[in-house]
Image (cartoon, rainbow, N blue to C red):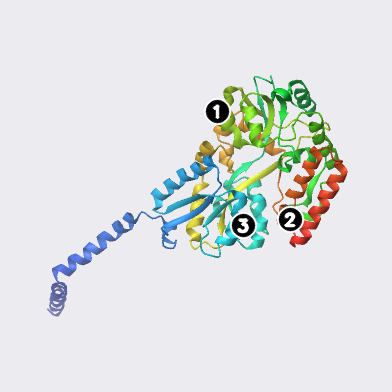
Amino acid sequence: MKKWLISLLAVLLIIGLLTACGPDEANESTEETDTQPEEQETEGRTEEETSMPEKPEKLTVWVNAEEKQEDAVNQIAAKYTEETGIEIEAVPIDMLEQVEKLDVEGPAGNGPDIIFQPHDRIGDLVLRGLIDPIDLGDSKGDFTEAAINAVTNEGETWGYPAVTETYALFYNKSLVAEAPATMEDLMAIAEEQTNAANDEYGFLMEAANFYFTYPFFSGNGAYVFAEENGSYDITDIGLNNEGAVEGGKLIQSWFENGYIPQDLTPDIMNGLFKEGKVATVINGPWMVREYQEALGDDLQAAILPKLDNGENPKSFVGVKAYLLSYYSENKEWANDFMAYVTNSENAMLYYDVAGEMPARVDSIDDPAIADDPIYSAFAEQATYGEPMPGVPAMQQVWDPINNGLSFISKGEPVEAVLDEAVQTIKDNIAASGATQ
């Protein structure tokens, strides 16, 4: 009897509690529980995004002032905006002008979140304190080893590699049956097909531009700075050694023999090649689409011809990357966009629109590149190349050596010109205070 009474009292207590709670409150509690997952779903944010700070209305990216490159970034940016709601303002500014502009605009609060730069300027940007390091995380293995090395400075990673490039030999199949395998073959074409009076040439290149002429120095044993295990000794400059002099004399012979005119500019060279008046030119993959539009199936490409010593010319290999501005107030989202613009799908979109080779492993292996007879030539040439030194001191090299090449093209003594250029480089480095 006692046990029955206790049970009855317990039931009555539960009923009382439910009644006190009221039907409205009970339904409200149930609805709140049921709708919670639905509210999370409508936000459409991934687990990673939920740990991100609040989305900014806009990110600003300084892109290179080239129409096709700007178009490619804008197409990718439109997709990103659709997916995230964040507007991407892509501002075209020449890469060479971005650094000085950031130095002024950044502290004033008018700078970008992201800039686009060649890797050899990273050291200078780090020294100036204009960029912040980034963490590639698991995506680090998506990029080629050369690309990762290029964006690494002082043991830290400073950008998302976007483009890898070097140069190779373009030739017009209607004028040249097959690619010249050696410099001797190339010089024979220059001799046979050059008629300057008619603006016809067998071989042209920017021969007073050190970026393009470096293979003819390095292939003979010259170097910019002595390098060991990725570290550069900027006190050891090899641009006036025996190999450099030999390379300089080879370049000078092209002008002396009339193969390359003194007043040649990139626009003149490209124009003549597209008109079918030039058999071969040395240039980069950024010209492929433009050349193809003009020459069609007659356009072919090959690695640089072997030097007389049997060596493959060592072209400069460059990497262009997206870098995070030190002054960005939206660093996490800027990092998110850099990862997005360089992912597998968008890397190939950029390649399709801008014609520049991605720095990703899966992109280089993509049949669109690997099986392409022209782009595959650049990929092969890159295996013979070497990265431009990514140290601040490299910025003190370009002007003196380019001035030296200009003197060489005019017939000045090669050895004396290179000695003077190297001394100027050393003086410039000392004046700049660069230690690497």
Where's the C terminus, which quadrant?
bottom right
For the residues carrying marks 3 and 1, which lies nearer the camera in this image? 3
Name the amino acid, label 1.
Answer: Glu
Where residue 427 appears, as percent x and y from the top left, is 80, 57
Element on which disc 2 rests: helix
Return the residue at label 2: 393
Q: Is residue 113 left or right of residue 317?
A: left
Element on which disc 1 rests: helix
Element on which disc 3 rests: helix
Q: CA distance from mark 3 to mark 2?
A: 17 Å
Return the residue at label 1: 293
Who is closer to the viewer here, 411 or 193? 411
Return the residue at label 3: 100
Where residue 111 appears, as percent x and y from the top left, is 53, 59
Q: CA distance from mark 2 to mark 1?
A: 39 Å
Name the amino acid, label 2.
Answer: Ala
